[in-house]
Amino acid sequence: MESGQRPMLFVSLPESGLLNPMLVLAGELARRGVENLWFATDEHRRAEVEGLSGTTAVEFASLGEVVTELSAVTWDDEVYREVTQSSRFRAHRAVIRQTYRPEVQARKYRALEAVVDKVQPALMVIDCVSSFAVDLCLVRDIPFVLSVPFLPSNLLTSYNPFAKSYTPKDFPVPHSGLPQAMNPWQRMQNRLFKLRTLLMFVNPAMGKVVAEDARIRKELGIAPPNPMTRVERAEVVLCNSIAELDYPFTVPDKMRLVGAMVPPLPETSGDDDVARWLDARSSVVYMGFGTITRLTREQVGSLVEVARRLDGRHQFLWRLPAEQQHLLPGALPDNLRIESWVPSQLDVLAHPNVKVFFTHGGGNGFHEGVHFGKPQVMRPLWVDCFDQAVRGRDMGFSLTLDRPQDMDPDDVVDKLTRVLDDPSFRRNAERLGALSRAAGGRAAAADVLLGLPALA
């Protein structure tokens, strides 16, 4: 890339599920020698951004400290229980109530304004949840690209039953966890999900928030919110999925399905304790439930019991955060290895001896598991996790726990045994993995960005 490349600014909230795919893409551009790369996110992610430098550097631009309302890992236990409750709609409503904070969005908007004034980007690449960044692009008329770590329909299906949607009328609404083939009761649930979402905004308490949002938008010169505007005004939408993982619908031309965003592998030398342990096993269940999941003592005990029941048949590698390890019982089975951190989850998933990925079904983990052709067992945590879980079941490469909240050992052993013993799950996972890899990932996404007129 010749010197003088016009500035490109990445903008993301600090949540791993949103940030990590964009770090992979920015790192790919840096390895190609693209100049004038900037990355704006919260201050505590500085080291990860600055560590991306390849042939050229990625400059960090701070958006300040973490805002609690926007960061799920900082929510208190009461909020966590509300957003992960068993009722899909109530959990969805709790997430909206927690994150729809106009004054918080305005704070990030103003912080980003200062960055934009300094960088003068020709193009911005924005995670699809950072609405404040999209708003700024619209006000300043800056070309932008959306990064989507979810299923394509997650972005293209409207919650408003009367608004434009790119999916058919009775398509499963995001966060509902409903399948494509619905019985009459499920069809009614699907329609009510949209209607109840709309009605949320007309109750008195939410009405005050809406009025505050309108006041702030007027002050900043931002148009009234319209979720589909971000799609219509984007130069392109980069979705880290493939069409075969979603239910059929016509994807708009500007959405490019590039598959999982995976960095060059291996990320480690392979000469570490975890890699050597995997090399010495023949059938490993990898358990990783993301950065947000908070397990109870009973749930932790249930998973230890699962490993104990499958001792002699399968080994378990469990990435359990250090702050939750005090919940472990005193005696652990010999086939269970627990790590608070693994050098690379991607290297683990790529290992041939890992036979099943036991996961919460988040967008990144779901697509990474598919990328490496791994069958999955899912314990959905919240919102989009239920949508990924039902797609995985219907596409024939995963099963979902009957009672995710309980983590009942009988249920978990049943699902793991079925996925491990039935070769169709692996065949389907490997077929979809080949399609995901063929979509091009980070290389295809980088090619799209560099071909945009905004950077010419």
Image: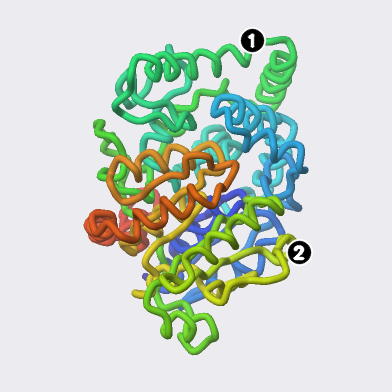
Tell whether 118 sits left or right of 374.
right
Amino acid type indicated by mark 1? Val
Q: Name the residue under label 1.
A: 202
- Image coordinates of residue 250 in percent, x first then y, are 24, 32
- Image coordinates of residue 111 in percent, x first then y, are 70, 46
Amino acid type indicated by mark 2? His
* Image quadrant in which you'd find residue 208: top right
344 or 351: nearer the viewer: 351
Give the SS element for disc 2.
Answer: helix
Q: Name the residue under label 2.
A: 326
Residue 122 higher or lower than 138, as above or below: below
Residue under the point 35% across and 49% down:
241
The reply to whether dot 2 and dot 1 touch (C-beta < 8 Å) is no
Q: Residue 33 got which mark?
A: none
* Image quadrant in which you'd find residue 308: bottom right
Tell whether 80 sits left or right of 443.
right
430 or 142: nearer the viewer: 430
How far is mark 2 from mark 1, CA to CA?
A: 44 Å
Q: Is residue 61 visible?
A: yes
